[in-house]
Amino acid sequence: MLSYELVAQSLFVGIQGDLPFWMRKTEHWTRSGYGPQPHADVLKALGRNPRPVPKAVGDATPLVVLTDKPLVVLGGQPQPPCEPYGSLTDDQLNGVKARLAEGAQASWELGTRAQALTELDAPSYSVLNDSSLPPTHVASDSLADVFSIARMVVGNRSTSNGDIQGPQPFIQDGAAGDPPSIGVAVLLANWTGRSSVDGLDYEGAARDQLDFLLTKVPRTSDGAISHRVSEVQLWSDFVYMAPPFIAYYGVLSENETLVQEAYNQIKLYRQYLMDSNAGGLWKHIVMGSSGTDPGHWSTGNGWAAAGMLRVLGTIQNSQYSKSFKNQIKDLQNWVSEILGGMYQNLQPNGLFTNYADNYTSFDDGASTALIASATYRLALLRDVHTHLPDAERSRKSLSAPSDSNGSLAHFTSNMWLTPVVNPYSFSRQGSDSPEAQAFVVEMQAAWRDWVAQGSRGVNHGIRLRVGPSVKWLAVVVGIFLVTS
């Protein structure tokens, strides 16, 4: 005998704006007009595996009602909670790491590679886990590749900077904000005693970089440090590169003022870049005589969210966690703000476009991986689970096979992520992106750590945007057949 079971997820979310991407594909929202393809899109939007739509569920065809009442979706068979599938194998991940090692040359690529390797290979030294700070002085073999980056950069510093003395970046660069991305690796090398092993002054190099950033780089009138050396210009990328270094330096040196400065820089950047008319998305570049980009670049939003999480984790795991409770809460809210703005633009295929709210721009796996990584990390650090189903959908999409022979839809045969934005020309599609490889490593590391903690929050509700200037209460209901 068959009976019906009603399963509901309540989404008590204030939502406004245009219809989500997947809803806009449906022209008629009536019983007769709502057919199998929109039903599949709805399931995708809910993180489910699309299934053929039966002609009847009890004698009723699937129905969507959009009025000033709650949105109700009838039909579809819910899937079990997220299974650990759709993940890269160890061999595939090693391929991603190998391409990253080959490609990372620019200052921010080296810094991002060092951070990704720390998260994956030496998680007890990462600020994104629950390990207390400062870390142990005992170096781990798992940090070998991270130390190799620090050794190469500091060893070549004099050559890069023309043998100057005093405040100077790790690497000569037109971007003031990018070289500090290597700073945490250099600080770790010094903290674990590598100076005597390598014959290099890691402490002095880190101090010179900090002094250069704080005293030589131009600022806005209210104190925001420029991302560029030649003039004041603010890039969302900066938040990943500089504040985590400043905060980590402050914790290791017991300098509370530096920890506060890391927070202050993020707060200032948000004041200039956050676009309240775009659901909390950040603009990419403002100010300066040329090269501005007011668009909501997806990777730039990922840089900002991931950077804020690194500062949040640094403070939360440090001796300043109690005295900085308000700052920690702000950082949590600001990351959530970006994730909310991004995920309302997630496509049915699980990827973001290069500019999050511009659906004519190309699909971008790089930002998709970075945003997913930030989502897992926010859940681990602060028990915020709002967008975990979205992150899971993105991760599974990026790891999905393209055929039965094991080829991957979003990786080349030698494990370069695709499609990706050109990291050296952010409005163009590119290939062989080192930063994209690092984002994949960070996503895999974050997902692994989240699964190890029990995949908490995987069944959390999903935010939807379903009407211009109207707040909705959305209840998604699945009706499925069970045998009684």
Image (tube, grey):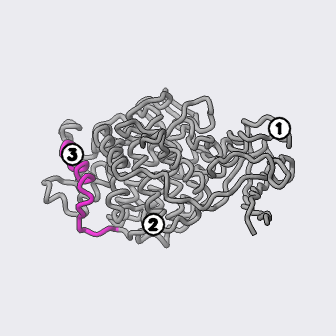
Q: Amino acid at mark 2?
A: Ala
Look at 83% across and 46% down and name the residue there: 66
Q: Foreground: 199 or 167?
A: 199
Image coordinates for residue 304, horizontal then vertical, percent: 50, 48
User: Which residue is located at x 37 percent, y 59 percent?
Assistant: 248
Give coordinates of residue 474: x percent, y percent.
Answer: 77, 55
N-term mark: 3 or 1: 1
Examine the rendering and report whether any part of residue 284 can be seen: yes
Q: Residue 21: x, y in percent?
A: 68, 39
Q: Is residue 136 magenta?
A: yes
Q: Is residue 65 left or right of residue 9?
A: right
Q: Quadrant of the C terminus?
A: bottom right
- Classify 10 Å Cα crowding around label 1: few (below 14), some (14-19), many (20 and above): some
Q: Which residues are magenta?
A: 134-157
Residue 175, image quadrant: top left
Left or right of 391: which side holds 205?
left
Up-down: is 111 above or below 420?
below
Quarter of the rendering occupied by the N terminus: bottom right
User: Depth-wise, is mark 3 or mark 1 nearer the camera?
Assistant: 1
Taking the image as shown, residue 157 lies to the left or right of residue 66, namely left
Residue 107: x, y in percent?
32, 41
User: Toward the viewer: 254 or 22?
Assistant: 22
Sort mark 2 into few (<14), some (14-19) or many (20+) by Cα contacts within 10 Å: few
Instruction: Please tell me the numbered disc located at residue 452.
Output: 2
Q: Which mark is residue 33?
A: 1
> Mark 3 sits on what residue?
152
**Comes first in the chain, label 1 or label 2:** 1
